[in-house]
Image (tube, grey):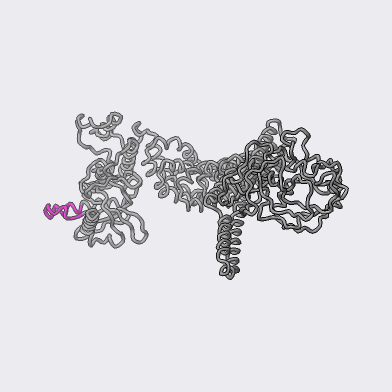
C-alpha cells in the first residue's frame, strides 16, 4: 500500500512539475486551469496538449503548450525562425472559422519559457492514434494506446479533411502546404480537424500550380478503390487534378455511415420535414455503425434536437435505441440528463401523447438503467400521467405495459400511487377495453403485492365494478382465482365465507355468461368450498384435541393437588394428635408408642411411593399421547402392612361350623338358670373327611372366648304353644338360655382346649367366601319382606332338600335332635311375625364382629 501511495505521489509530482515548467508565467493561466497532459500534435508533434477548464465558466478546453527548451540546441536565428513559424500558424488558425478546422478558444500567449493557446476539447492527434507517441507522457494513456479506427471513421475523416481543404482552396484561396497526421486533430466527438498552418501560402488559383511527379511505387500502399483518384491528384498538369469538392463525390466516400455522419454535420441547414424523414430512417442505419461513432458523433446531434418540441417524437426513438447499447454509467452521464425535460413535456398535446407512447414501450429500459431517485421523480409521474390521459389508446397501452416492468417499481409507489390510478381508470372509464385491461393488469401484478393489501383493498374493489359484461366478469373471476391459488397470497376462510363466495355465486348465474364461462365460475366456487370445508374441519379437530389434552392435564393437576392436600391433612392430624396425647403418653407409655406407630403407618399409607408417582407420570404421558381416547383415572394404591399367609377356606368353614354347633346340643332338659358361657371352639366333620387341627389357627366363627356372653344369656320371649328348642313332651318355655352342653352325642370332639384358655383376639373373618363355596349367593331378604312371607317359605330358602349328602345329622350346624325337633323344621312359627321381633333387653356383651358374623350366616 505504501509503495502504491509513493508511486501515485511521484506521478502527481511529475505531472505538476511538467505543467509548472511548461506554462509557468504564461498569461493563459490567468483565465484557464491547466490539467493533465493528454496528447501531442502539430508539426513534429511539438505541441503538448493538456486538459483545461475556463475559470469563469468552467467550460472544458484543450491547452496547447510549446516549450522553448525543445529548440535550445538550435542557433538563435534558427530558434527565431521556428518561433515565428509557430506563431504564424496559430494566428492563421485563429482567424479561420470552419467546422473542419480546429476551433481556437483563446489566442496565442507567449512567455519567456513557452507558447500557449486554447482550443475546443480534443482527444488526440491522428498521429497519436496511428501509433506515433512522441512527446506523450509515459506511460501512454490506454485510451490512445488501444484506440482503433473503424473504416467508417477513416472514410468520414478523409471526407472531412477534403471538405476543409475545399474550403481553404475555394473560399480562402489558401494552400495548407503540410497536411499530415500530426496536423489533423481528433476532437472529443471524433471529428477530424485541420491545424498546423505554419507553411500555408495564399494562391489565386491553387489548382493551377504544379507539384512534383511521383513514381508508381509510391502508390502501392494506397487502397485500390482510391488509387486512381490519388494519381489524378498527383498529376503534374493542374487542369487534370480533381479539386477537393470533386474528391468528396468519388465512390469511395459513397458509404452509408459516412453519408449519415456527413448529413448530421449539415443538420442545422435542414428544415423539419427533411429532419423528420432522416430521423425515421436512422434506426436502420444505427446498428451498422460502431458504438464509439454513435456515442461520439451521432448522440450529441440527436440530443441537440430536443430543444425543438415538434422533433422530439422523431428523435426520441433513436436516443432510446442508443441507450440500449450504452452501459448504465454512459446512460446516466450522456443520455439521462438530456431526457429530463422530455419526461415533463406536455405541449403540444399530439407530440406529448406520442412521447408517452414511446416511453411506455421502452419502460423496462428506463427502469433498469435509471437511478431510483430519478425513477421516482421523473419516470413514474409520466406513467401516472399516461393512466390519466384522455386518449384510450394511451391508457390501454399503459395498462398492457405496466405488468412487464411491475417488478422494477418500488412497493410504496405501486401501493400508494399506481394501484389507485388503475382502479380509477377501471371505474371511471366508459371503454370496455380499458376496464377489462385494468382487471387484467391488476391480476398480473398481484404477485408483487402484499397479501393483506390484496384482501383489504383489491378484493373489495371488485364488488364496486358496476359492469356485468362477460369479459368483465371473467376478469373479476380471474383476480379471485389468482389470489386464491397463489402460494404467497391466498384467501382466508373467513373471507371466502363472508365476502368472496357471496359475491361470486350471484355472478355465476348471470344470463350473459356462456356454458364455458359458467363452468369456470362453478369450478372456482367448488375449489373454494372444498378448501373452506377442509380448513374449518381441521381447525375443529385440532380444537377438540387441544380441549381433550387440556382436560387430561387438569385431571392430573387435580389429582396431584388432592394428594398433596391429603398428605398435608394427615400430617396436620398427626401433629395435633401428638400434642393432644402428650399427657397420655407419659401415663401409658406402651399404648402411646403403639398409637404413634399406628399414626406413622397411617401417614405412610397416605403418602405416594416412588413407584406410584412414576406410574402416575406414565399415565399422564399416556393421556397426552392418546388424544382421541378418554383418559383413564389413575388408581392410588395405599401401601398395606404385610398380611399373613392365606388360609384354607375349608379350615375356616369347619371352625365356624364347630362354633355354631356348640350353641345348641341335644339335652333332655335345660335349666332355667343356665347361662350362655364361653363356648369352646371345636371342629365338626361335616361334608369334609379331613379332621381339623385347632392348633393351626386361632380363628373361630367370630364368637371367641374373650367375647363371652353374660349369665343373663340370650333371652327372647316365645309362644308357650311352640316347641322351639324343646322336645314334644317338654312344656313351653318362657325364657330360653343357651349354655354349654354336657355331652355331644353324634359328634366327636377334636382337641377341645380348656375352658379357661385365653385365645388371641383376631379380626372377624370375612364370611363371603362361604357363599362362594356353597354356590351362588342368594339375595338377602329384608325384615319387612320376611314379615310378608310364610314361615315355611322363608325357611325353605335355607333348608336343603332331604337326602342331601352330609346333612343327616345337622343343617347349618344346628343339631337335628337338639329338642326333639329341628328349629328349622317347624311348620309355622309365630316367632317370625313382625311383632315378635321386638327383643327385650339383653345382658349379653355386644360384639360387633360376632353380630356381623351371625347376620352373615342367618341372612
Q: Can you give x and y, in whole percent of width and height, for residue 407 in the image?
A: 51, 44
What count of labels does the image hold?
A: 0
Snapshot quadrant of residue 674: bottom right
Q: Can you give x and y, in whole percent of width and height, for residue 465 in the image?
A: 69, 45
The foreground one among 521 and 655 is 655
**Most frequent secondary structure within the magenta stretch:** helix
> Relative to 119, does residue 144 appear above or below in the rendering?
above
Snapshot quadrant of residue 226: top left
The foreground one among 308 and 337 is 337
Q: Can you give x and y, in whole percent of width and height, for residue 698 in the image?
A: 61, 49
Do we see residue 778 in this rendering? yes
Where are the magenta residues, as a range?
Answer: 67-84
Taking the magenta stretch, the answer to whether it contains residue 844 is no
Horizontal side, residue 511 vs residue 89: left or right: right
Q: Quadrant of the N terminus?
A: bottom left
**In this view, which residue lies farthest toward the right?**
721
Taking the magenta stretch, the answer to whether it contains residue 73 is yes
The foreground one among 101 and 637 is 637
The foreground one among 779 and 284 is 779
Snapshot quadrant of residue 183: top left
Do we see residue 458 in this rendering? no
Q: Can you give x and y, in whole percent of width and height, for residue 762 in the image?
A: 63, 52
Horizontal side, residue 276 vs residue 197: left or right: right
Residue at position x 82%, y 47% in the image = 724
Horizontal side, residue 246 vs residue 696: left or right: left
Amino acid at each position: 500500500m505504501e509503495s502504491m501511495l509513493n508511486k501515485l505521489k511521484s506521478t502527481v509530482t511529475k505531472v505538476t512539475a511538467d505543467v509548472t515548467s511548461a506554462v509557468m508565467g504564461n498569461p493563459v493561466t490567468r483565465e484557464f486551469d491547466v490539467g493533465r497532459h493528454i496528447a501531442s500534435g502539430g508539426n513534429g508533434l511539438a505541441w503538448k496538449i493538456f486538459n483545461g477548464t475556463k475559470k469563469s465558466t468552467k467550460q472544458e478546453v484543450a491547452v496547447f503548450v510549446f516549450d522553448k527548451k525543445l529548440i535550445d540546441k538550435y542557433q538563435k536565428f534558427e530558434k527565431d525562425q521556428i518561433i515565428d513559424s509557430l506563431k504564424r500558424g496559430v494566428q492563421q488558425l485563429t482567424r479561420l472559422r470552419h467546422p473542419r478546422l480546429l476551433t481556437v478558444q483563446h489566442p496565442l500567449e507567449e512567455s519567456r519559457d513557452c507558447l500557449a493557446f486554447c482550443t475546443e476539447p480534443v482527444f488526440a492527434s491522428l498521429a497519436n492514434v496511428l501509433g506515433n507517441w512522441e512527446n506523450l507522457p509515459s506511460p501512454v494513456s490506454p485510451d490512445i494506446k488501444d484506440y482503433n479506427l473503424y473504416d467508417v471513421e477513416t472514410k468520414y475523416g478523409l471526407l472531412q479533411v477534403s471538405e476543409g481543404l475545399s474550403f481553404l482552396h475555394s473560399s480562402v484561396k489558401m494552400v495548407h502546404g503540410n497536411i499530415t497526421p500530426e496536423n489533423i486533430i481528433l476532437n472529443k466527438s471524433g471529428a477530424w480537424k485541420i491545424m498546423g498552418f505554419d507553411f500555408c501560402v495564399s494562391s489565386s488559383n491553387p489548382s493551377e500550380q504544379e507539384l512534383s511527379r511521383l513514381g508508381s511505387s509510391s502508390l502501392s500502399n494506397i487502397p485500390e478503390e482510391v488509387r486512381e483518384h490519388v494519381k489524378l491528384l498527383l498529376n503534374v498538369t493542374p487542369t487534370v487534378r480533381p479539386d477537393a469538392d470533386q474528391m468528396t463525390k468519388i465512390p469511395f466516400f459513397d458509404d452509408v455511415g459516412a453519408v449519415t455522419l456527413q448529413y448530421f454535420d449539415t443538420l442545422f441547414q435542414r428544415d423539419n420535414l427533411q429532419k423528420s424523414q432522416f430521423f425515421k430512417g436512422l434506426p436502420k442505419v444505427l446498428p451498422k455503425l460502431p458504438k464509439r461513432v454513435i456515442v461520439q458523433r451521432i448522440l450529441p446531434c440527436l440530443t441537440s434536437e430536443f430543444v425543438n418540441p415538434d422533433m422530439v417524437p422523431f428523435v426520441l426513438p433513436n436516443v432510446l435505441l442508443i441507450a440500449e447499447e450504452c452501459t448504465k454509467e454512459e446512460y446516466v452521464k450522456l443520455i439521462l440528463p438530456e431526457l429530463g425535460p422530455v419526461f415533463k413535456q406536455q405541449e403540444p398535446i399530439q407530440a406529448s401523447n406520442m412521447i408517452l407512447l414511446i416511453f411506455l414501450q421502452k419502460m423496462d429500459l428506463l427502469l433498469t438503467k435509471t437511478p431510483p431517485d430519478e425513477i421516482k421523480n421523473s419516470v413514474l409521474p409520466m406513467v401516472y400521467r399516461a393512466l390519466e390521459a384522455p386518449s384510450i389508446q394511451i391508457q390501454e397501452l399503459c395498462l398492457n405495459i405496466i405488468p412487464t416492468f411491475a417488478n422494477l417499481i418500488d412497493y410504496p409507489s405501486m401501493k400508494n400511487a399506481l394501484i389507485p390510478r388503475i382502479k380509477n381508470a377501471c371505474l371511471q372509464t366508459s371503454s370496455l377495453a380499458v376496464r377489462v385491461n385494468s382487471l387484467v393488469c391488476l391480476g398480473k401484478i398481484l404477485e408483487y403485492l402484499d397479501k393483506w393489501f390484496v384482501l383489504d383493498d383489491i378484493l373489495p374493489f371488485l364488488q364496486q365494478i358496476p359492469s356485468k359484461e362477460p369479459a368483465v366478469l371473467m376478469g373479476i373471476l380471474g383476480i379471485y382465482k389468482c389470489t386464491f391459488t397463489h402460494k404467497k397470497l391466498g384467501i382466508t376462510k373467513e373471507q371466502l365465507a363472508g365476502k368472496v363466495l357471496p359475491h361470486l355465486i350471484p355472478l355465476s348465474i348471470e344470463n350473459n355468461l356462456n356454458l364455458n364461462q359458467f363452468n369456470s365460475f362453478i369450478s372456482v366456487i367448488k375449489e373454494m368450498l372444498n378448501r373452506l370445508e377442509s380448513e374449518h374441519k381441521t381447525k375443529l379437530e385440532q380444537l377438540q384435541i387441544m380441549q381433550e389434552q387440556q382436560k387430561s392435564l387438569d385431571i392430573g393437576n387435580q389429582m396431584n393437588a388432592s394428594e398433596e392436600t391429603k398428605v398435608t391433612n394427615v400430617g396436620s392430624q398427626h401433629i395435633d394428635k401428638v400434642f393432644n396425647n402428650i399427657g397420655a403418653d407419659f401415663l401409658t407409655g406402651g399404648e402411646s408408642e403403639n398409637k404413634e406407630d399406628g399414626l406413622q403407618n397411617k401417614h405412610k399409607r397416605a403418602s405416594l411411593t416412588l413407584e406410584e408417582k412414576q406410574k402416575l407420570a406414565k399415565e399422564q404421558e399416556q393421556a397426552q399421547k392418546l388424544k382421541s381416547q378418554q383418559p383413564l383415572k389413575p388408581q392410588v394404591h395405599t401401601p398395606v402392612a404385610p398380611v399373613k399367609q392365606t388360609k384354607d377356606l375349608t379350615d375356616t368353614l369347619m371352625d365356624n361350623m364347630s362354633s355354631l354347633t356348640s350353641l345348641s346340643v341335644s339335652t333332655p332338659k335345660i335349666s332355667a338358670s343356665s347361662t350362655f358361657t364361653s363356648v369352646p371352639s371345636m371342629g365338626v366333620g361335616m361334608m369334609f373327611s379331613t379332621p381339623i387341627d385347632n392348633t393351626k389357627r386361632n380363628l373361630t366363627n367370630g364368637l371367641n372366648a374373650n367375647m363371652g356372653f353374660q349369665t343373663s344369656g340370650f333371652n327372647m320371649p316365645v309362644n308357650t304353644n311352640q316347641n322351639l328348642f324343646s322336645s314334644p313332651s317338654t312344656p313351653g318355655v318362657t325364657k330360653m338360655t343357651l349354655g354349654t352342653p354336657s355331652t355331644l352325642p353324634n359328634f366327636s370332639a377334636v382337641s377341645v382346649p380348656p375352658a379357661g384358655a385365653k385365645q388371641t383376639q383376631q379380626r372377624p373373618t370375612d364370611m363371603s367366601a362361604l357363599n362362594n363355596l356353597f354356590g351362588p349367593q342368594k339375595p338377602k331378604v329384608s325384615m319387612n319382606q320376611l314379615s310378608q312371607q310364610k314361615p315355611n317359605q322363608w325357611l325353605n330358602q335355607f333348608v336343603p332338600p332331604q337326602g342331601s349328602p352330609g346333612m343327616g345329622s345337622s343343617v347349618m350346624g344346628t343339631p337335628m335332635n337338639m329338642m326333639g325337633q329341628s328349629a328349622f323344621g317347624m311348620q309355622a312359627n309365630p316367632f317370625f311375625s313382625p311383632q315378635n321381633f321386638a327383643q327385650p333387653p339383653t345382658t349379653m356383651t355386644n360384639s360387633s364382629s360376632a353380630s356381623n358374623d351371625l347376620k352373615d350366616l342367618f341372612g
